[in-house]
Amino acid sequence: MPAPSSHATDSGPATTYSIRVASRLSGISADTLRMWERRYDFPKPVRNPNGNRVYSSEDVDRLVLIARAMQAGYRPGEVVSKQRVELETLLAQNAAAPTVLAQDDGNVAAVLDAIARDDLRRAKRTLGALAASHGARAFVTDVVGPLLEHTGQAWASGRIEVRHEHMLSEILANQIRALLAAYEDHAGSPVVLLATLPQELHRLGLDMTALFLSTLGTDIRLLGPNTPADQIVSAAKALKVDAVALSVSVHADTLAAKGYLSWIASELPAPIELWVGGKGARNLSIDAPRLLTPISWQALEEATRRLRSRTR
């Protein structure tokens, strides 16, 4: 990773960060930073002699607070324009408010403690044992789901850092893909295509959904994250799928997501259904035929069983 650079000012040397480093430190994608710059006039980086964006330490600190506020449930339009003191007040109030989280039987706390202590080996070992004892479907719903909720709360309150969340995401992704390998070459029904929209780089929810659907006997086609809208439609047609399932994270740009989803829904031929899930789906309101928003595992299971019955 490129190191931050420093340049002298009247008050001493100032540290600046490239857009790649600012993105990694805050957990906000570079594309999103550029979009916020245009839409909200923040962040407003200066340009170095090469014409590249550079961000100050104050910019990055504020971006971290914004990311934490979004993890706590706020929309970009509600927090991006707020100043640092306003964000700190908002997060303090949110931390003081009672938060309803998924129940922890002790396993979540054990994994989070290992991650916070940078004990990746113990975190991997614990998650591997939980996958073996729970089975694939319950591992997704009863272990990974609650773990992500508690991780998001821990990060929003500042108990863990962005790097901890990233490390945990990678460990979870590897464990889920290992479980998913058991379902390779499985010819099931219905056939579901999974992807995320352009500029949507978070794929953990996609992997979780792929594993969950596979345990239901569904035939999965994974496109992965950050897929152009026209390629999602083209793949759906070429692969003759029964449904397209798209994961929208809480970090997604709501207006852009609505535009993409409305276009995809209008282009998908009947009878292909469009399923939209993820935390970001709660912020969307789109009226389109054959569009469903199964934002719970139970709702996704019901949609799968109904679609299987129809396709048969």
Image: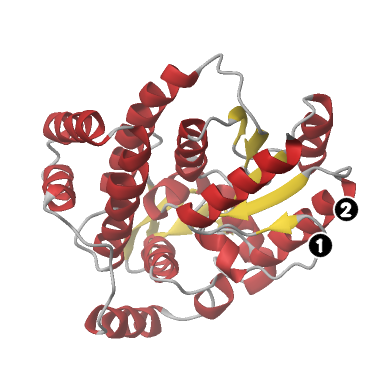
Residue density around tag 2, few if under 14, some if 14–19, many if 20 or more, within 10 Å: few
Tell which of 42 and 270 is nearer to you: 270
Amino acid found under the numbered disc labelled 1: Ala
- Would you name the residue on which mark 1 appears? 288
Q: Nearer the viewer, residue 245 or 82?
A: 245
Identify the residue at the far top of this view. 185
Residue, x 38% and y 62% (percent of image)? 64
Quadrant in which the C terminus is drawn = top right
Position in image of residue 174 (x %, y %): 36, 27
Query: Is residue 250 visible in the rendered structure shown here?
Result: no
Q: Is residue 110 above or below residue 223?
A: below
Q: Nearer the viewer, residue 153 or 199?
A: 153
The image position of residue 205, as x and y in percent, is 48, 45
- Residue 57 is situated, as x and y percent measured from the top left of the image, at 37, 61
Whether 85 is drawn above or below 80: the answer is below
Q: Residue 118's image quarter?
A: top left
Alpha-carbon distance for marks 1 and 2? 8 Å
Image: 310 above or below 58 = above
The residue depicted at 28 percent of the width and 55 percent of the height is: 151
Residue 233 x, y percent position in the rendering: 81, 38
Residue 137 shows up from this direction: yes
Residues at marks 1 and 2 touching, judged by CB atoms closer than 8 Å: yes
Residue found at x 22% / y 56%: 160
- Residue type at mark 2 is Ser
Judged from the image, the secondary structure of the residue bearing numbered disc 1 is: loop
Q: Is residue 113 left or right of residue 311?
A: left
Q: Which residue position is annotated with label 2?
A: 266
Question: Mark 2 falls on what kind of element?
Answer: helix
Q: Position of 269 compared to 151: left or right? A: right
